[in-house]
Each structure stands twice: as structure tokens, then as C-alpha cells.
Amino acid sequence: MYELKAEGAFEAAHQITGYPGKCARLHGHNWVVEATVRGTQLDDLGMLIDFKDVKKGLAVVLDRFDHRFLNELEPFASGVNPTAENLARIIYNEFKVSPIFVRDAHLAAIRVWETPKSSVMYTED
């Protein structure tokens, strides 16, 4: 089994509705998103998947969040709190259907870093 990781990033603001502290107020983050791809079959070049393709595919998903107020975007606008946990799940579900995944290469996890010392990982397991 091969596992590769590639990162993307975006900047966005949010506020956590009902949170009993500072995070209930409007604030922003420089979000870093790490995609983990797994698989067993390499192509003729000896690659599971090109890092460049993973980064480009991830960037397509992250673009809708960049320089936005997350609370105004779906599904957050419909009452889902824009926590790092929910954001990781949403990014995972949007990215896993990307056409970049070929052979048996598949998205295994998304890790969202809210700060350099705080992150959450989402998998379907």
C-alpha cells in the first residue's frame, strides 16, 4: 500500500454559533488542508498519482472557501456550524469524487489545520 500526502491552503473567516468563548465572535484563519491518498497500483512511471494532480484537484475544492465568510456558504448557511471538524468532512466529501483519482488511488483522509498547532482529520472509517 502506498500513501502520499499533499497540501493546499486558503484564508477564511468564521464564527462558531453557540460556542461559549471567543470563537463565537467573527475571526479568521489561514487554513491548511492536507489530503492523504492511498492505493496499491503504480502507473508506468512508478507513481500512484502525481502530486501535481492532487494539489490541483484539492485547489479546485478549496477555491470556494478562499477569502470567504464560511457561515454564508452552504451547508453552513443552513445551520451547520463551520467547525474544523465539519469543514474537514465537507472537503473530504467534495474531493473524493474528483476525476483525478484513477486506478485504485483513492482519498483516504483530509486533515484541516486551523492553526499551526491545531488540526482535525476526517476519514470515512
Image (spheres, rainbow, N blue to C red):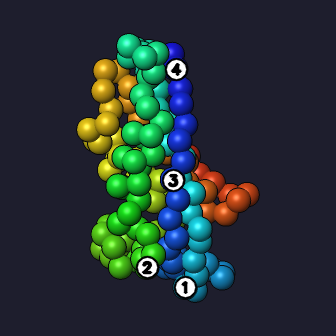
Instruction: Calculate the distance from the C-alpha at mark 1 to the C-alpha at mark 3.
Output: 23 Å
Q: Which residue is mark 4?
A: 2
- In the rendered view, tell whether residue 63 sits above or below residue 94: below
Mark carried by residue 26: 1
Instruction: Calculate the distance from the C-alpha at mark 4 to the C-alpha at mark 2.
Output: 36 Å
Q: Are marks 4 and 2 in contact (CB under 8 Å)?
A: no
Single out the residue that lies furthest toward the right: 117
Whichever of labels 2 and 3 marks the residue nearer the N terminus, that label is 3
On the rendered structure, is 100 left or right of 67?
left
18 or 58, nearer to the observer: 58
Amino acid type for the residue under numbered disc 2: Phe
Label 3: which secondary element: strand
Whichever of labels 4 and 3 marks the residue nearer the N terminus, that label is 4
**Mark 1 residue crowding within 10 angstroms, few (<14) / some (14–19) / many (20+):** few
User: Which picture quadrant has residue 100?
Assistant: top left
Amino acid type for the residue under numbered disc 3: Gly
x, y percent for residue 98: 29, 42
Q: Are marks 2 and 3 in contact (CB under 8 Å)?
A: no
Whichever of labels 4 and 2 marks the residue nearer the N terminus, that label is 4
Mark carried by residue 72: none
**Mark 2 residue crowding within 10 angstroms, few (<14) / some (14–19) / many (20+):** some
